[in-house]
Image (spheres, rainbow, N blue to C red):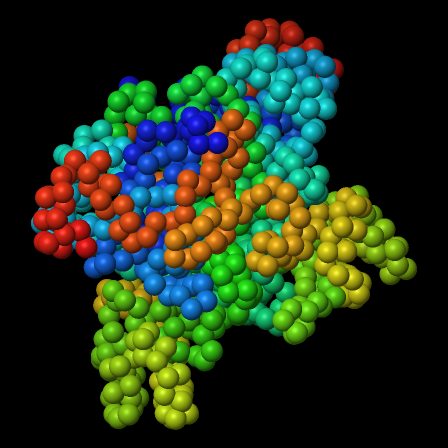
Amino acid sequence: MSDVKQPLDGVKVADFSWFGAGPICANTMAEFGATVVRVESESHLDGLRAVGPFPPDKNTYNVSGYFNNFNAGKLDLTLNLNTELGMKMAHRLIAWADVFLTNHTPRIIEKWGLTYDCVRELNPDIIAVYQPMQGFDGPHKYFMGFGAVLGPITGYSHLSGFPHRPPMGLGTNYPDYVINPGHTLVAILAALRYRKRTGKGQLIELAQIESAVAPLAPALMDYAVNGRVQDRTGNRLPHAAPHGAFRAKDSEWNGQPEDRWIALGVFDDQQWRGLVEAMGAPAWASDPKFANLAGRKQHEDELETKIGEWTREHTAEELMALLQSKGVPAGVVQNARDLLERDEHMKARGYYVYLDHPEAGRTAYDGPPFRLSKTPGFLRGPAPLLGQHNDVVCKEILGMNDEEIAEAIVEQALY
Amino acid sequence: MPDAALDDIRILDLSGEIGVYATKLLADLGADVIRIEPPGGDPMRMIGPFVHDDASPDRSLYYFNLNTNKRSITLDITKPEGREAFERLVKTADVVIETFEPGYMDSLGLGYGRLSTIKPDLVVTSVTGFGQDGPHAHYKWSDIVGVAMGGMMTLAGDKDDPPNRPYGNQGYVCAGIQAAGGTLMAIVHRDNTGEGQHVDVSMQEALSINQETAMQTYDLTKTIRTRTGARGALPIDIPGIGVYECTDGQVFAYLGTPGGAPWTVMLEWMTREGKADDLNDEPYVSLIQSLNLSFLTGLVREPEKLPERLKQLAHLYDVFKRFCASMSKWTLYEEGQKQRLMFGIVSTPEDLVKNPQLNHRKWFQQVEHDHLGETIMYAGPPYRLSATPWAIRRRPPLPGEHTYDVLGEVGYSIEQVDTLKAKGVA
């Protein structure tokens, strides 16, 4: 596959980002051909290197599954930006790049002098991409944040989950993984096209709260237009019933019972008839009060109880196959074990990719998020070790000789 | 000099809910997106909320949000004359985005293979629940099926409840974002080489990376991450971490994280407010001075001190909880953040609309709807491009509003369009 010309062959990315929102975006660019130089240092380590999961009995900076999954196939350069020489080298890297990417805070960007005005002086046509939490102006410009706080601030926590529970959020730093890196990728690709057409670079500012709130627009419009403050409604939807996750027969994992769930949604009467058929047409389901959506919504508590009694008798996998055969959208609430080992469909499509890493061993990575028939995208290698490519980047990209590299090491610029 | 990044791109948009966020993203960056609705209208127009709760097809706020900057034609592509019109449009298009069951477009004679003979450099993007091939390719999907099968739901919620579906069709949103990215990637390749291609987006795959560390955790340690409720992975209530009730809602706190102020700053604030209780006495002062994340992980290493430490922590938690309960969420958020204490407001939609930062940055957009005689507030840009800004240049279309214009652009006379309409094709 490596001899196919990829869409981003020749595109050079200076990746000064860390954690999720920046690195994942550059990761996709690398999968489609871009050369990505990831800049970090011992003095300013990507926090994910220190957070697990780690393989058993290993916990160096190079083996975190969290970090490695977002950085496959990048070149890693350890530059200490608190040294004069380190910053000089950073400037040379920026001058080389087509895209400069960072999700550091405005405070750090200002301290480092890497604002767009400065970056543009080093490289007038560069596409300079910033992902501040709140933006580069305004009263909350310097507010701190990371994924865990972003979910509450942007409305996901208030709106998701059951009304009798506190707003506990989605169990992850959700906007970090698709919403913010995915939006950023769209903006960068649009800017790359514009640059190809006009020769001009530009500034892209993705304020993480703005990017994360944007998909929740209907709830905001409902407030602005109708004065309604939407609240948590669990798994229900106004225009479907039943709609939710129902408990299936327990299974066993590591000698312990494991709860299993089937998610399903009935959006029209045809799907309802499919569900009834799947259940074996029990007498209760022929009650006219369940015959249409309005009735099913009105009697939703009872409906959910009855369906739950049925699902509890069958495995989630049986339920999925049966419901799907009757035309009802349904799927197992899968966990990571299901996705990696048991989902025959994911296996057949080969979504997860296993790569050999010099320290972590053979481990799984997410594959490209979309498939292009002629330029399919692929992981060019495992995640880099900290500073793995210092030598090659210094020589081939920054044009340094052995003596200059030695000096950079002595001065702790390469660090 | 163009002022929109994609103003030379034309997209034929056949997408349902699963792909429509992609075409919105591209339209808002300037692409000419032509939405092709079946005669009788797009079912998405009947999904609420509605303007003044009036459930009619020209009033869906859900539809409005997802169809800014697009034009609309009505065309029945299952009929031969509809297909002919569609093919004429394809000759002028750069991209077709569709979300039918795999194989359906082929069955109409409009699959990628056929369309690429009409327009060799065409990009066709297909967005579906499970992708174009594999044993589940023909499975029915909805948003909840995606977030279930993709591994997100199992991580959300309380152990005593069913797994939680994220609000707001996040399966569709993420599939849409990846589809927009994939489409642009294919366009970049076309620009470079003149070669079109077929982009395959599976919602299940599009969502996988949202599992955060669950996939790697299982891969590396054979343990399964699951939903852990309000306390998250923490075994006990930790003062300053988690969701706290306020006078008017909730805040989320994460005190003691690197880069933020230490707990002593929190204590000073509580003291200034006269709400520190006995926390300025021992053993609490010492406890607070050493309270950070490494302290907490170190707790388990001194098991003999653990019971007493837990009691002290529980008291600190109670006093902190009472402090939060006596304050407004905005005060805790804004005053806390000014002191570099990591508070985040648990925003309601109202809080977001009133958010001082979003308003200072003029994020919200006002869009005139001439047909309603009203101006409606829209969400703003996910990103700001300095040379080619995101913009709402055109309100969402009425059903078939641009049928005459668009078909006229590919050579149909008004009379011919009238005939198509009379036959129920347009």
Image vertical order of residue B247 relative to residue A149, above or below? below
Could you say which is closer to the camera, residue B216 or residue A147? B216
Could you say which is closer to the camera, residue B127 or residue A139? B127
Residue at 67% x, 48% y is A344
Which quadrant of the view contains residue A163?
A: bottom right
**Left or right for B147, reference B328:** right
Whole-percent x, y for residue A36 in the image: 32, 40
Image vertical order of residue B176 relative to residue B82, above or below? below
Which quadrant of the view contains residue B239?
A: bottom left
Give the number of marks: 0
Q: Is residue B333 visible?
A: yes
Whole-percent x, y for residue A365 in the image: 48, 50
Residue at 39% x, 37% y is A29
Q: Is residue B45 visible?
A: no
Outermost residue, right side: A283
Whole-percent x, y for residue B104 in the image: 70, 28
**Left or right for A71, reference B50:** left
In the picture, the quarter occupied by the C terminus of chain A is bottom left
Residue at 22% x, 44% y is A391
Residue at 40% x, 78% y is B238
Whole-percent x, y for residue A409 in the image: 14, 52
Image vertical order of residue A299 relative to residue B44, above or below? below
Image vertical order of residue B189 relative to residue B268, above or below? above
